[in-house]
Image (tube, coloured by chain):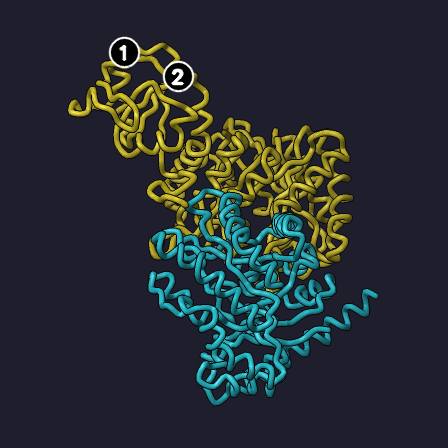
Chain colours: A yellow, B cyan
Amino acid sequence: MNILCTSHKIISKQNPQQGIRHIQSAGFEDIFWDLSAYVPSWKLESVLSENMEDISGFLEDVLIQEDKGGLKSSIVQMPYLAADTKQKNIQELLFKLALFAIEFGGRAGCVGVIIKPLFAGVLKEMIWEVNRAYYLSLAEMAKKQESIILLENQCKSIHGHLVRGICAEAEEAVKWVDALNEEVGEERFGFCLDVGVCNICGQNMYDFVCSLGHRIKTVKMRDCDGMQDSSLLPFTCANKGLQQTDWRSLIWGLREIEFKGSLILDFADTIAGFSPLFRPQILQIAKSLGDYFGWQIEMEQFLQKYDQRVLFGAGNMCRNYMKYYGEKFPPLFTCDNNSKLWETSFCGLKVNSPEYLKGLPENCAIVICNIYYKEITCQIKNMKLTNPIVYFSDEYLPVQADMECD
Amino acid sequence: MLKIGVQSDNVIEDGNPQEGFAVVRRTGFSCVDFSLNRYLRNSNIYKSEINHFFSQSIQELEMHFSSHKLAAEREQIFINQMHMPYPIYMPNGSNELNGYLREVVAPKSLAVCAFFGCPYIVLHGYKTVQYVGSEEKEWDQTERLINFLAPMAKEMGITLCIENLYSNVGGHIVGGSCCNAAKLTERIDRINEKYHAEVLGFCFDTGHANLVGIDFENFMTKLGHRLKVLHIHDNDGKGDLHQIPFTFTLNRENEPSTDWEAFIKGICNIRFDKVLSFETAPVLNAFPEEMKETVLSFIAQIGQYFIKKIEKCKHMIL
């Protein structure tokens, strides 16, 4: 899975090299170019035309530096209007900016370009027709640049109250993506799921993700309080000890569709809120979060990769493995370092000494069902075993582990 | 022809229902949403504290409500909808509690509904998605309950109305049961076809929809004729406050933060011709008792405003 770091509030016009360095040092290999950082919505609100040469000149400079750094740029996002914009006659400029983003993306090696739909000044009953024409007129350029145009779920503003906008209902998003692809006769359009928008619109992300399925190419991971459209680092928006975003429902949905696309870490507001001195540390946390999400989402894909498997650990995590995956991915046995458990049975599995691992076939995976992942991995390596190792986690299960249903 | 209704809770009291129905009529309403849920409050069900109001026989219940029925007739107020006690299933409740809710409370609610000659009863679907894993499985549970009640409803000429609900994740409200219009239309049609009768309809709750950012117009238009009753009320987009429409604003221009225009268009699009029913009993707790009739009149006037706008919209379409 591709983990991308946003450029917003990190790669500045004044000193782009520093931002790129920070991103690289944190371990990211891929950048999400959010062009709204350089042509912000407030600017689109007040000017009718933008000096395209200024923008392209700056981005080309950055591109050259970026090439030196060896960072990839898989996804770019064009500048966009705020949900509560007062602009009504800006479609021509938005079209130019969209073309610019696609072209820039092509040169930067992007595979996807997020292009938000036109809404300002468009009558509700004309939304699809206007956007159909808009997206189709961009398809040729996207084809030339070998990139996919990504539609995205939107909020709309009812006098400041953000509610479900264009493509915020899964059925509509599916219809739009499919209709556009059908018209161009190839998969030129996909979907970027904005977690922040789903949260603001109070949506069940499991259902949303499952309805969109393979159309989701990118997920924008950001936290918010469910009311304001902010981009906070995931897990940082909590109240009274409770998360404000339903990460479980999202992760479970992405597991269900076997998501393999790009995960964008979008935390511009978190970065902006801290002193720049903390930027390297925040970026490191962001990278760890990206890896964590990738691991959680791909867990089932790892489990099904191997024909045979054994478990390591005979506690609660093993119990949950057997409850939710025991039938789908049955293990040969489990083992545990606690000698008192050896030769006993746990959840229908024989508990062996870790010494039994030495007799495993080469491609049999050892699934660690214990939070001491690193220590157990070390133990396995010290035993000179070369079997693949998979880390299991029961943090996000489809049904609350200790609850029975009727 | 559109009519205007209001919740009976906080207006019609058991001690003197005649006076309550007279207030309803005086303040400009012709219909009532009878709050049967006040006889077994949700706050008590959550605590598994069950009174035994519904343990009375149907004859005893009819006796209890006979003065209400008579008063409604005298004041020419039509009880067009009522609210069944909720929740009707507690995920962590005992078998005894859930059995009582399903086997006693729900059927006797239908019996009371039939006694009043009320055509619609609002029923909350199951709220178990976090326990069963998916909305589909949650719906399966709701559908089993509907299948249990549908033959009785058919026999009594009542339409069960499921309602868009919300759920809670970390104190943040998210869409719950019955918030997907496309799925709802399929489910309602399938069930009605099965029983060869309109045993299932929909109750659109504007406040709940506002909390989870549902597009009123799109949602109502998709539901079409399946929409039978309304719960009209307003909130700040954060809490289920059940306040008067047009109350909340989020900008300095003081424009409403709830999309009432979309509500009017939705009603107009589907040619809804039933009751604009206000679920605003909590408003009467907020205002002083002395202002009750003034507040109710004001709510009724908002209903009249809606009717005017809806009729105008219908003419424009024609």
What residue did someone put label 2 on? A308
Q: Which residue is depicted at the point 35% across and 40% down?
A: A401
Judging by the rendered image, the residue that carries numbered circle 1 is A358
Above-or-below relation of A209 to B277: above
Q: In the rendered structure, the residue with mark 2 lies on which chain?
A: A
Q: Residue at x 56, y 82 (%)?
A: B70
Q: Of the residues under marks 1 and 2, which one precedes in the sequence?
A: 2
Q: Are marks 1 and 2 on the same chain?
A: yes
Q: Classify the position of the C terminus of chain A by image quarter.
A: top left
Residue drawn 53% across the image and 29% down it: A260
Q: Outermost residue toward the left?
A: A340
Q: Is residue A215 left or right of residue B97?
A: right
Q: Which image quadrant is residue B269 in?
A: bottom right
Q: Nearer the viewer, residue A231 or B20?
A: B20
The amino acid type, in three-letter code, at marker 2 is Gln
Q: Mark 1 falls within which chain?
A: A
Classify A7 as above or below A369: below
Alpha-carbon span between mark 1 and mark 2:
15 Å
Q: Is A324 left, or right, of B158 in this rendering?
A: left
Residue B317: numbered disc: none
